[in-house]
Amino acid sequence: MDFTIMATSFPKLLSAAVITLKLLSLSLFFGIFIGLLFAILRLNKNPFINKFAYGYSYVFRGTPLLVQIFIIYFGLGQIEYFRTTFLWVIFKEPYWCAIIAFALNTGAYTSEILRSAFQTIKPGIIEAGKSLGISNKIIFYKIQIPVAIRQSLPAYGNEIILMMKGTSLASTVTLMDITGVAKYIISTTFKPIEVFIVAGSIYLFMTFLIHNFIKFLEKKYSF
Amino acid sequence: MEILSFGKTGWGDELFYATLMTLAVSIMAMLIGFFFSLIFTPLKLSNNKFLNFIANSYTTVIRGVPELLVIYLFFFGGSGAIMYVASIFGYFEYIEINAFITGSFAIGIISGAYSTEVFRGAIQSIDKGQFEAGKVLGIQKHIQFFKIIMPQMLRLAIPNLSNVWQITLKDTSLISVTGLVEIMRQSYIAAGSTRDPLLFYSIAALIYLILTFLSMKLINRLEIKYSRGF
């Protein structure tokens, strides 16, 4: 056990944690909107629309995140026409490619979580709203969505942790997040165990914080 | 389409073998995972606080740390650890473990943490009366486990194990960083030499989709088989 390497690599890994957190928060932010959109599409009566939403979540949940990143980062740049559009400004950056891939991926999982939450809302709540003469739109925004969000909190907490682990794949497209820096230190010092302990503890600490934060929210919004 | 044909000019056969490799690693990892859960599930369920602690730290650490980091640990640290053990027994030559074994072990340990949780949950949700009835009837402990607990546990565990299998199958794509030629690595090689990453990564995605689809079909059958009588 080489403690000097652990001590010197700790600050480097900690500063890399900023990138991991940035990737995580941005992709979760976009992912929630994508998830909510597709969850609503899934509940649509039109078979074409809900099949499309199902297909989206099936494809993104059935393929590894690594493939999704590679298609977006390496694949899209290959289309000549695509490179002339304004989107290229975003898609040429590995940082944004990673975030787009993560957001689409977590969006697929979030849509499944929210869909099942919508479907398990007790019909009594909606009926109560209707009998009070509340319009369908307000029932949806003020009753269904808040209840669904509360019900999906535990599952969404797991999804946040899975996504945090998923951000490690950003290191495969040259981003220096915790895993990227850890790999760099390992390959220059050949001390895999020490670096793993330090990097792993940072990740575990983040997992611990997320876990407790979700627990806190669950308690706060319990009914 | 020629680029995907089987034979010397196409990548079809390479991708086919890569798919077999992915399946082999996944199955191997799943088996190693079962082996680990066979050790850690009893530790989790035991009354001894220390044993509990060991099993809990295993599942917490593995499930809280990115898979890629675990793979790097095994990839860079694996042969070092083996050589260290070998040096105790007086063997000082360089030992290189092949990527297949390192990869299956790394993924296996991850998959083991998930299946441990699945088995723990399944055993805990079996009615207490089943254990007591076995005891009262004077059935030996291991017979009780294999004939009474296990059949009921499997029924409860199979749906969740199918999730573990999906996670494991998708995790094998990460082994491509160690150079093992599975679907992702082969697509990477093909994309590099044909300069057509969009096509090859899309095909890789398609292969994974087919694999997950087929395995779901297969597992649903198993589920029906083990749910007979319920």
Image: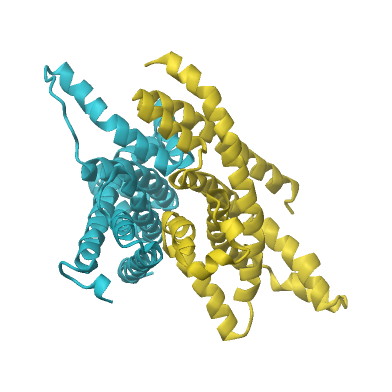
In this rendering, the count of numbered labels is 0
| Residue B211 percent location from the top left of the image | 32, 66
Q: Note whether A7 is above or below B32 in the view shown.
A: above
Image quadrant holding the N terminus of chain B, namely bottom left
Q: Quadrant of the C terminus of chain B?
A: bottom left
Q: In this view, does A214 lie above or below A183?
A: below
Residue B121 percent location from the top left of the image: 44, 49
- Of residues A72 and B93, the one nearer the viewer is A72
Position of residue B110 in the picture relative to residue B85 (left or right): right
Quadrant of the rendered image containing residue A39: bottom right
Judge whether residue B140 can be spotted in this image.
no
Residue drawn at 48 percent across, 61 percent down? A77
Relative to B97, A157 lies left or right: right
Any idea which chain is the yellow one in this picture?
Answer: A
In the rendered structure, the answer to whether residue B150 lies left or right of residue B167 reads left
- Relative to the observer, which residue lies in front, B225 or B93? B93
| Chain corresponding to cyan in the figure | B
**Image coordinates for residue A84, horizontal then vertical, percent:** 57, 66
Residue at x 50% of width, y 42% of height: A175
The residue shown at (22%, 45%) is: B100
Q: Whole-percent x and y of residue A29?
A: 66, 53
Q: From this viewpoint, is residue A174 visible?
A: yes
Q: Does residue A131 sit above or below B47 in this rendering?
A: below
B159, B75: nearer the viewer: B75
